[in-house]
Amino acid sequence: MNPTATKTTISDAICTFCGCVCDDIELTVEQNRITEAKNACVLGKAWFLNHHDSERPVCTIEGRPATLEEGIDRAARILAEARYPILYGLSDTTCEAQRKAVAIADWIGGTIDTTTSVCHGPSGMAFQSVGEVTATLGEVRHRADLVIYWGGNPAESHPRHFTKYTLMPKGLFVPRGRKDRTCVVVDVRRTKSAKAADIFLQVRPCKDFEALWTLRALVKGLSLDAGEVESETGVPLAAWQDLADRMKRARFGALFFGMGLTMTRGKHLNSEALLALARDLNDFTRFVCKPVRGHGNVTGADNVLSWRTGYPFGVNFSRGYPRFNPGEYTATDVLARREADAALIIAADPMANLCQAAREHLASIPSIALDPHETPTTRQATVAFAPATYGISAPGTVYRMDDVPLPLRPAIPSSRPGDYEILCRLEDRVRPLVAGRTGT
Amino acid sequence: MTRKIFLLIAGRTSKQGCGISEGKHTAGYRAETQTLQVSQEDMAELGLSDGQRVRVSRVPSGSEPSPGEVLPGGLDRSCQVPVVALPVETAKGGELPPGVVFIAYGDVSCRLMDSDTHGSGMPTSKGIEILVETLPEPETGEFGSTAASGVG
């Protein structure tokens, strides 16, 4: 690829905006700008077409331009001198960078958490207690004749989930595509996704657990009081019975769930109920269950932390070995309780996304931020790096929401280092400082 | 002034998602994340019209949600900061049931979240019990009359 050529086409480029990680994007690049993104959804087009190499200095210290080396040195000293540092973010960067971040957390005895904790972290907890009957999206595409979305709105959050993976494609065992599939949406709101469904069940707010337990009982053949079920869930018992029957009759069923379960009262218990329902259904037919993941490589963050530490998020190294405890080592808690005394934020914007108490504390401590875009987090950071954008300019590996790893195909070269290169240098600088601190 | 307790759901919208790439400073992103969507029935009950501003505050946790509760006189359930003022718009296509309001993820939804994660790491950000109060006169906030502003 010649960046000075007037027009270049990159086929099979990967969109890293959301967890669908669509790998069939055809990009047209003119004068180092992406001018067309064929096959991309509305979110993907916004991701690609608004990309431009940042005009920010590659590094700033307290808002003033600095060299990369100066920034690395200052960042390393902040982390090495901290008593309870936290590393946070990681859902919009490569697995290679995530691996380096875990290494740094280990060296400095810090806490490392990802945006999973405010996304599907509760589902991660539920996996540990119930397990996950899983499948790739390719399997769903070729086999699923019943597709259920619970507490999610993919029509707006993951627009190609329907068209690329679950509803519209013609598959090996569903040759007529949409005509061979039944789609059910269960939600509090009658969202745009509900309009794509054959059946929409509108549950009462905060009653997902009760609704899921109702279904579990019906699948097991228990009889329930119709009045009580409807008053609790907002949906008539007959509608739940119909859904339970459809689930048992399906040849291959797929349950996808969103943050309508994890962000609502009950949290991991809601996810647990859904995962247990999918497990129960395997007594009758093949049924799988997957969370619909938000950020481009949040699934990679779960995988990398799991194979590096044994735990998917909320990991603490302060005793020299990894410990996992959501509610204790998760970013919202560590920051809102004012425990952390320094922060390394990688590819996330907690100053825009965390609760107010966490944001206020983060603004009060020294912090380092890596983000291609200027954000509220980079603006208040002591040291801010503006790396190359992953997927568009920086290479590496990302995981699709069904745990399938994909190699990125960057479209535009950048003179900026990526997150991985910056974190490699930061680790190299931190190690001697920590060794000097501990005398090892 | 009319006051009513709602359950707030924060979530992704297409416009908010595109706004992340277009820039969080853009007018489109700010308008999308700083507008409260209300069901047609609740708009009528509270006498609201599109663009009118309301005051929103989080009801302290620890009590059972009671959406639909209307507080006619002085507050009998104390509310806590943060308090924000923001415009409302009618939810399209009957998307919301009465008693439930929606806002796209953003600064306002984060301000209204409690920091308590109940041992999960996840603060409750869907199904937050909030108090909505109509404002007698249009208030012009820091960012003009179509955006949210802190008033508490």
Image: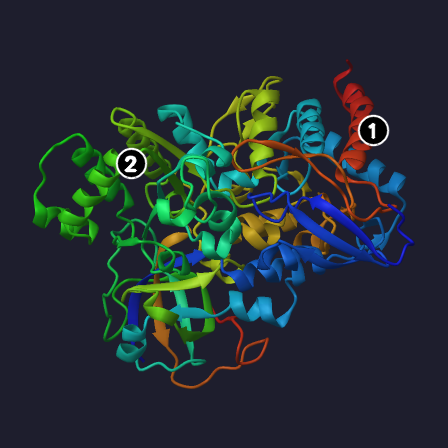
- Disc 1 residue type (three-letter): Arg
Mark 2: amino acid:
Ala
Image location of residue A188, percent across then percent down: 31, 55
Relative to A374, residue B53 above or below = below
Nearer to us in this view, A221 or B44:
A221
Q: Position of residue A25 (x, y in %)?
A: 66, 49
A402 vs B37, left or right, is right
Q: Position of residue A95 (x, y in %)?
A: 67, 32
Is A292 located above or below residue B56 in the figure?
above
- Chain on which label 1 sits: A
Residue annotated with mark 2 = A250
Residue A218 in picture, x, y percent from top left: 17, 36
Give the left or right position of residue A217, taking residue A293 as reference: left
User: Which secondary structure lies at badge 2?
Assistant: loop
Residue A429's mark?
1
Residue B53 or A187: which is nearer the viewer?
A: A187
Q: Residues within 10 Å of mark 2 (few under 14, many from 20)?
A: many
Q: Residues within 10 Å of mark 1 (few under 14, many from 20)?
A: some
Callouts 1 and 2 in the same chain: yes
Does residue A243 appear to the left or right of A395 in the view shown? Answer: left
**For the view shown, which residue lies furthest in the front direction?**
A175
Label 1 to label 2: alpha-carbon separation:
57 Å
Image mark 2: chain: A
Determine whether the residue tagged by mark 1 lies in a helix, strand or loop: helix
Q: Quadrant of the C terminus of chain A?
A: top right
Q: Are marks 1 and 2 in contact (CB under 8 Å)?
A: no
**What mark, if any, has residue A399 been given in the picture?**
none
